[in-house]
Amino acid sequence: MLSRTEKNKSQRKKIIKEEQKEKRNKMIIVTLKVLLVIAILISLAFITLRYVGNFGLVVKEESLTYSNLPENFHGLKIVHFSDLHYGSTIKAKKLSQIVDKMNEIKPDIIVFTGDLVDKNYQITEEDKETLKELLNNMKAKLGKYAVQGNHDKNNFDAIMKDTDFIVLENSYDLIYNEGYTPILITGIGSSTLKNVDIDKAFYYFDQENANQDIFIISLMHEPDNLDQILEKYTPDLVFAGHSHNGQVRLPFAPALVKVEGAKKYYEARYTISDTELFVSGGLGTSNYPFRLFNHPSINFVRLRNK
């Protein structure tokens, strides 16, 4: 028979084991709760970055007034889109909705500043036909213009040649609107692809009858190329892309990611002396399919004559 002391020792051991077991169970429960909260937060962050951030379309509208804009261009409406990256977070259905939104504005000119198809997307012939159709469905009274982006190595030319977009590859065009005084639009290639010839894009000014005071719109993919242009020329209005304005942002903070070619100019808008620069936040995504505080967007700029 066990003595009272031995019985007490046995009971204490049993109590200690139960207490230890209870502590372990509590730790397991607490750990599982913490892991569950972390999993929920990660899931919410993923949903926000992948789906909420890529939801909808923001139309960034601006009105600009110029003394050198011809009177026959007063009220000119320009829609600017960029970095479509078709196949990333943009497919046919979403692009069709974007086209409808553009057409609601009834733009006079539409400009596209590069990166048509995402580099990681294996585009099909059906995709190509869909892209051609949707690009042709964009309506602009005076013309549609495009420049090449750094991702536009393989499919860009094949698709764009069957659309009514005019590709400005280190070239220019004169735009007329119910009058004899035109405006000039120029476009340079991608510096990432080492395809920039500024003098060729601005060859208009080498001609004897060139109007040196003509209103100039310039298109480029990488916005940092603007500094090279400003060394010799002074465009009034410039549209660019490439930066996605950082793609993932925090409130009241600069872009978290700055890419080569958009290290200096990566925000949505800049004024450099007499030149207005608009850098598109893009429609699709590049490298990773996430957006934060930076929804897909297009620029809508209305020009007025003083």
Image (tube, rainbow, N blue to C red):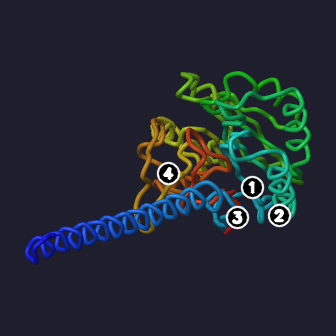
Q: Considering depth in this image, is 230 or 156 the residue closer to the camera? A: 156
Of the residues tagged 2 and 3, which is closer to the observer? 3
Q: Which mark is residue 187?
A: none
Question: At numbered mark 2, what does the secondary structure look like: helix, strand or loop?
Answer: helix
Q: Which mark is residue 79?
A: 1
Mark 2 in CB contact with mark 3 (< 8 angstroms): yes
Vertical placement of 193 versus 86: above or below?
above
Of the residues tagged 4 and 1, which is closer to the observer? 4
Marks 4/2: CA–CA distance: 26 Å
Marks 4/1: CA–CA distance: 21 Å
- Residue 21: x percent and y percent? 30, 66
From the image, tell me which residue sits under label 3: 59
Instruction: Tell me the residue at 10%/73% (across/down).
Output: 3
From the image, tell me which residue sits under label 4: 246
Q: Quadrant of the N terminus?
A: bottom left
Q: Residues within 10 Å of mark 3 (few under 14, many from 20)?
A: some
Relative placement, left or right, of 189 versus 181 is: left
Question: At numbered mark 4, what does the secondary structure look like: helix, strand or loop?
Answer: helix
Tell me the amino acid under the disc marked 1: Val
From the image, tell me which residue sits under label 2: 105
Mark 3 and mark 4 lie on one chain; the one further toward the N terminus is 3
Question: At numbered mark 3, what does the secondary structure look like: helix, strand or loop?
Answer: strand
Mark 4 and mark 1 lie on one chain; the one further toward the N terminus is 1
Mark 4 and mark 2 lie on one chain; the one further toward the N terminus is 2
Relative placement, left or right, of 147 versus 243 is: right
Judge whether residue 144 can be spotted in this image. Answer: yes
